[in-house]
Amino acid sequence: MKKVIWTVIAVLFIITKSYAQKMAYEKEIGTISNKLSTITATEAKEPAIILSEKVVIEYAFEDKNLYKFYFRKRRVHLNENTAIEQFNRIYLPIEDDKQIVTLKAVAIGKNGQLKEVGKEHIKQIEEEGRQFSILAIEGLEEGGELEYYYCIKQDLRFFGTENIQDDTFIRNYQLAIISPNHLIWEGNIYNTNQPFLSTTDTVAKTRTIKVELKNVEQAYSEKYSASDANLIRAEYKIAYNKAKSEDRLFTWAQAGKRFYEIYHDGEEESQSTIAALVKELGLKDKSEEEAVRIIENYIKTNIAIQKNTDAARIKDVVARKYGHKDNIYQLYLFLFDYLNIPSQMVLCSNRFEKRFDKDFDTWNFLNEVLFYLPVSKKYVHPDNIASRFGPAPDEFSGTDALFIKTSTLGGQKTGIALTKKIEELPLNGNNDDMWFNVDFSENLSQIKGSYKRVLDGQPAAEIRPFYFLSNDEDRKALLTNIIKAYTVNDAEIKNTVIENFNINSDEINKPFTISADITSKSVIEKAGNKVILKVGELIGQQVEMYNEKPRQNPIEIPFPHSYHRVITINIPKGYTIKGLDALKFNILYKNEDKTMGFVSGYTLENNVLKIDINEYYTNIFYPKSAYADFAKIINASADFNKISIVLEKGI
């Protein structure tokens, strides 16, 4: 991405203007008051509240070079000790202390005493293998406050994201983006109705876009939602450089052309390498689908993506068996082109993190890559070694993306960009089916059952690759955990058989199947001449949804899917069975389409009890208004999990 952008910048932004100007952040710094704020009863219930937050992003010249100056100022009231733990370190977006223009933090005690810290309290820490710079804060007290500000000088970037909402309530939030008036910035605020407003300062010769938000809610992570994507945030980009041209900058059309150029660079000089590889893999007479599968299997099995390596010639990447991800993308495209396989590069975003907005052309949305094969209407995800040619991975489905197809203009090949939706997966073909045939031991102290689970589509994709890529020991552990999770926790498992697990063969197109013999004692209880069978536990532990707080987010699930479970129980001779009505459920989403539901029933013939359970979700998106119905369906499986039936011996 950096390579793509900065080669464009060299042409578009030859800076010729320079202004002596007072920086906006200088108006925001000064004496910090020791007067504590008055907190409402509602605010006092939170561990902390952000009383005010101001972010100023200013693009300004130094020695005829344009830089980004990032200023943040916060005042926080601390209600609980847990908040002290949260705010006793401030993460700084720096790589070097020299980037700090100004910095100050003051802890205000509940009696008004002040304790100031500065640059000398900056520390380097490591978390999850990553290095961070933090400012360590001292003197924070429950009932006190914290105020801090910093300004960081950064290299020029023409796209940005500012995350606004998080897990702390904000009473007042302000964001301003300031630039010389010939550089026109545009922005969008997501997940709120408040827009950016623009102003111009004719004296300072600057233009500002700004937004102010009041009472920004504390955000919660919620099950079955895209909580991160639903947070309030700002996206911004440079749209015009009026000193150079009236043309819009960094459009989707320009992205299509530029990304095409980057990822087809060096194609002609790589033809001999590509031809040799085509011959080695025996691709010449293969069908399109066969060829794509062979290419994907070969690359993902033999050539590793390495983050910390420079781009290289395709010849060297193939020879040394590793390369930068940009080279891996090129290798796919060169092979497709050599074999005359129509393909389109797809640039997109993970919908659970940030949804692609086709109406706002910031290249910040172009952070994931797929290849779309329009003849077969299937996708390759080159970065994920566990995925294989088929539907788009669920994190990209149901959202817009930028498709780049090859076109010839004036005898030259180029990339034409089109925004369109990556289709949602259908319910059909995304199935998780289970059959469990149950007998009893002679003394009725345990059950003995034959278990079979058949997964197709995305449910299979969540297990099959990891089983295939694991060693024998890990495979055994994986299967044990899966079977116990979907049956009973004390299951003793024997005679396990796995079918269709090879992701590098045509087995990828077949259902992934697990079969095993299972015994369990925990589902049996005895009471005199009665035997209690915890039949609900045979479907495994289920998720429950009982929110103490009002739902914030709409419902969003990875993919449409269904669970079909058939439990057959062979009743011992001489026993009758009671409590069967509890097995009947009929819970449906209350609209005409019945797009989700939990339905169960039973038949009893010749001492054979057959329980049939269907749970299904046809869509990936449901409105927040459907949450109560959605929770009922989710909880129905948890309620079923608690059901017991009674076997009583006849007299």
Image (cartoon, rainbow, N blue to C red):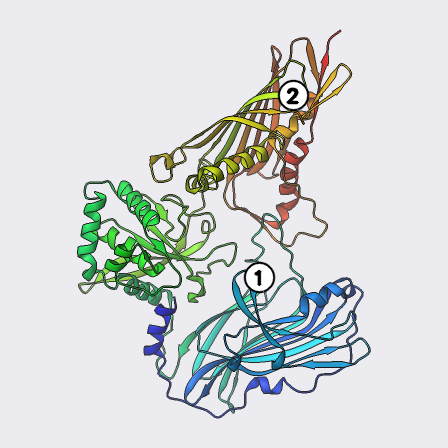
* Numbered badge on residue 466: none
Q: Is residue 520 visible?
A: yes
Residue at horizontal 79 percent and vertical 80 percent from the top: 112
Q: Position of residue 157 (x, y in %)?
A: 44, 74
> Up-down: is 11 above or below 647?
below
Q: Are marks 1 and 2 in contact (CB under 8 Å)?
A: no
Foreground: 318 or 397?
A: 318
Residue 420 placement: quadrant = bottom left
Work out whether mark 1 precedes mark 2 in sequence or the reverse, and give the earlier one: 1
> Up-down: is 422 above or below 640?
below
Left or right of 14? Residue 129 is right
Foreground: 119 or 174?
A: 119
Residue at horizontal 32 percent and vertical 52 percent from the top: 303
The amino acid type, in three-letter code, at marker 2 is Gln
The amino acid type, in three-letter code, at marker 1 is Asn
Left or right of 379? Residue 570 is right
Left or right of 169? Residue 508 is left
Q: Is residue 339 visible?
A: no
Left or right of 456? Residue 590 is right
> Up-down: is 641 above or below 567?
below
Residue 134 placement: quadrant = bottom right
Q: Nearer the viewer, mark 1 or mark 2?
A: 2
Give the residue number, with chain letter if any, for mark 2: 446
For the image, the number of numbered tags is 2
Task: Tell me the element at label 2.
Answer: loop
Task: Tell me the element at label 1.
Answer: loop
Q: Quadrant of the C terminus?
A: top right
Give the residue number, with chain letter if any, for mark 1: 191
Residue 315 placement: quadrant = bottom left
